Amino acid sequence: MASRKLFERLKLTWQVGLLRTSASTSKAKVMVTLDEGTRKAIENNTLKPRHHPGVVRNPTIHLPDTIKSAIKSVIGDTPMKQLTDASGELCRCLHARLAPVEHSQIHRMTKELMKVEHQNGCDTSSMLDEDLARYHQSLSDKVRYKLKQRVYNWRPLDSGNRHVALIYLVARSAAQYAVMSRVFAELTARDACFAPTTLFDFGSGVGTVSWTASEAWGGSLSEYFCVDSSSEMNDIARSITEMIDYKTYKKTFYRQFLPSSSERKYDVVVSSYSLLEMPSAQAREQTLINLWNKTEKYLVLVEYGTLAGFKAIISKVVLPVRMTEKGIGQGWFDLCSRGPDTQSVDSAQELENSRK
């Protein structure tokens, strides 16, 4: 009943908005244009709210048994209970993660706080040099304390440690596999003739992009180039890929740094869950420029479905649009505005169930 009332309200709003827009010519207004079939269905009351064209139903995506077996082999004798508990904490940390605050913003906040403290402070004209030094030190301590309360304490993910890399594998492999499966399926649906031969994965982590790309375009892909700063992540990805698909493993190359040359281009370039790991906005923009210069056909950006992830994506898609307007590249489109993170089975839960 509630959905029916909402649908009727939207229908009325659309009709009134159409009349107001057509009647008023003094100010430009944004108007949504429905396709002819949907418009007629709304007017004839034949379109049911639960089955309108905008409904997207994503099925639950499970990790394949081959990948689960490979993950369990990589985990080895490490206590699963310990990894499961730590993976839950890591997931909460990652979903609450924000982009690092810029140094210029910290400097501006420091000046503003210091100005306020000086205004609320006492008269220093009659102070001795020793007392004046102690007074300024106390102001600096107060400002530093307030900055700690207001500034997000960003730290890079310590993925150079194998134990942390295993925790990340257990925490995020199933969710990232589901997201990338959805993205590649949507890309295939929009471009049915697309058959990439090369793939570049920036921030490749444990290799989820390679797994899903192999399932989507394994017949045409001849090279997977994976870049991750963590050697432990690369080792884990290499071991899992070798166990699940030896043919893909032979075509996969792992590096810790971006290639300096931008002459080589790849059909698909992917950056998944990497933008918030950059230490500054300048580093994020420069990385995106490098990735864009390596892109032959599609550049795929994926982040967490949080406000910080949305801002990281939306602030960076402006750059390719700007470059496209200058004749560089082929434009962009939004593959899926909401990833299926919540419709994937939790990695730790799935691995634990497979052991029983």
Image: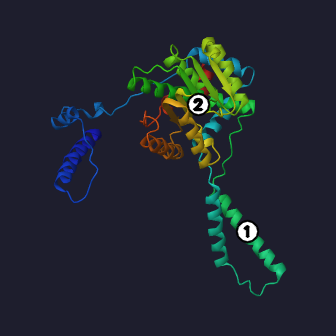
In the picture of the structure, the residue carrying the numbered disc 2 is 263
Give yes or no for contact between labels 1 and 2 (Cβ–Cβ under 8 Å). no
Which quarter of the rendered picture does the C terminus lie within? top right
83 or 118: nearer the viewer = 118
**Label 1 amino acid?**
Ser
Q: SS at mark 1? A: helix
352, above or below 55, in the image: above
* Distance of label 1 from label 2 (alpha carbons): 50 Å
| Residue wearing tag 1 | 140
Name the one closer to the observer, 327 or 304.
327
Does residue 244 appear left or right of residue 55 in this picture? right
The local secondary structure at tag 2 comes to loop
The reply to whether residue 80 is visible in this rendering is no
Marked residue nearer the N-terminal end (1 or 2): 1
Figure quadrant of residue 44: top left
Where in the figure is residue 206, as x and y percent of width and height? 64, 27
Q: Position of residue 338 (x, y in %)?
A: 45, 36
Residue at the (62%, 50%) spot, across then down:
100
- Is residue 279 visible to us here? yes
Quarter of the figure with the N terminus: top left
**Residue found at x 39% / y 24%:** 189
